[in-house]
Amino acid sequence: MEGIIFDIKHFAVHDGPGIRQTIFLKGCPLSCWWCHNPESQDPKPEKFIRIHKLDGQEYKKEETAGYQISVGELFTIIQGDQIFYEESGGGVTFSGGEPLMQYEFLAEMLKLCKMNHIHTCIDTTGYASLKIIEKIALLADCFLFDLKLMNHKSHQKYTGVPVERILNNLRWLDNNQANVVLRFPVIPGITDTTKNIGEIKSFIQTLQNIHQIDLLPYHDVANGKYERFHKENKMKGTRPLSDREMLNLKLEFEAIGLKVGIGG
Ligand code: SF4
């Protein structure tokens, strides 16, 4: 069986416990305004032109984002860093895009990792059928689960999909005592409003087993990518929050008893 990935990050330290290898699977059902990886959204490999500068000259080169890889090939790459997982209590994180979009490939990878005692995390939007969530929850050790906007209309507007399925899946994972760390992308003027933060805190307080959240600061690092992939950058010119503002937000979530990290 083969999947399509677009990147592999070695020695990642913000994608779950310990030192990890993060595999980025291609394809995402969402289209968030602030996406740092716009090349992740299309499920198929995409061609683009990269401009290289050398001695004041510009050179254009056609490249492709995304490639097919077999379960066996990818597992060999994962095993290459196994000593670091063992030493640090780390493992592998499947990210994207949305890794659940390729859930059959993902399930095969998770089975192999489980058989070889490699810890696994799924970095997910939670936007998948409950059947898929149930299957993957049997195989994965941990979910890094995004919570973005609680209001239905806002979620639809800024991510392109409704929020209900995501909240239902999160509640199912909580009821079934899955190991979940929440992730909150702090997007100026969109997700960081007093109303949205208040609603997110109220929702989290109804969960029984989830006690940790990572705040993911907005960065404007993807501007070049939007140009390369001819995609509209709706966040152009947005100022990231200051360290002080992020710290205040951290204190706010800590005040409801959560363990809070910044970054991811
Ligand atoms: S869920 Fe993540 S990968 Fe998908 S569009 Fe949103 S930010 Fe991009």
Image (cartoon, grey):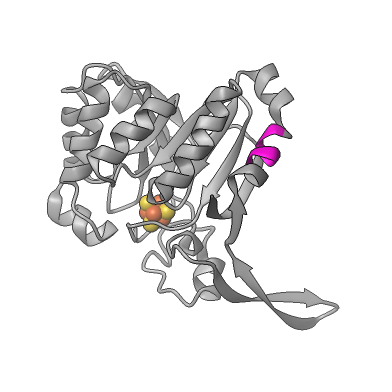
Q: Residue furthest right?
A: 55
Q: Position of residue 121 (x, y in %)?
A: 48, 31
Q: Residue at x 33, y 22 (%)?
A: 178
In the drawing, does residue 44 fall left or right of residue 212?
right
- The image quadrant in which ligand 1 is located: bottom left
Observer-nearest of 6 and 257? 6
In the drawing, does residue 184 fall left or right of residue 56?
left
Observer-nearest of 63 and 253? 63
Q: Position of residue 252 (x, y in %)?
A: 29, 27
In the image, residue 58 lies in the stretch drawn in magenta: no
Above or below, comparing residue 77 to residue 97 in the picture: above
Q: How many marks?
A: 0
Q: Residue at x 57, y 33 (%)?
A: 92
Q: Position of residue 21 (x, y in %)?
A: 62, 36
Above or below, comparing residue 90 to residue 198 in the picture: above
Residue 224 visible somewhere in the drawing: yes
Which region is colored magenta? Answer: 75-79
Quadrant in the picture for residue 132? top left
Q: Residue at x 73, y 23 (%)?
A: 83
Residue 150 visible somewhere in the drawing: no
Q: Main SS type for the magenta part?
A: helix
Q: Residue at x 64, y 43 (%)?
A: 72
Observer-nearest of 8 and 195? 8
In the drawing, does residue 123 fall left or right of residue 258?
right
In the drawing, does residue 16 fall left or right of residue 33?
right
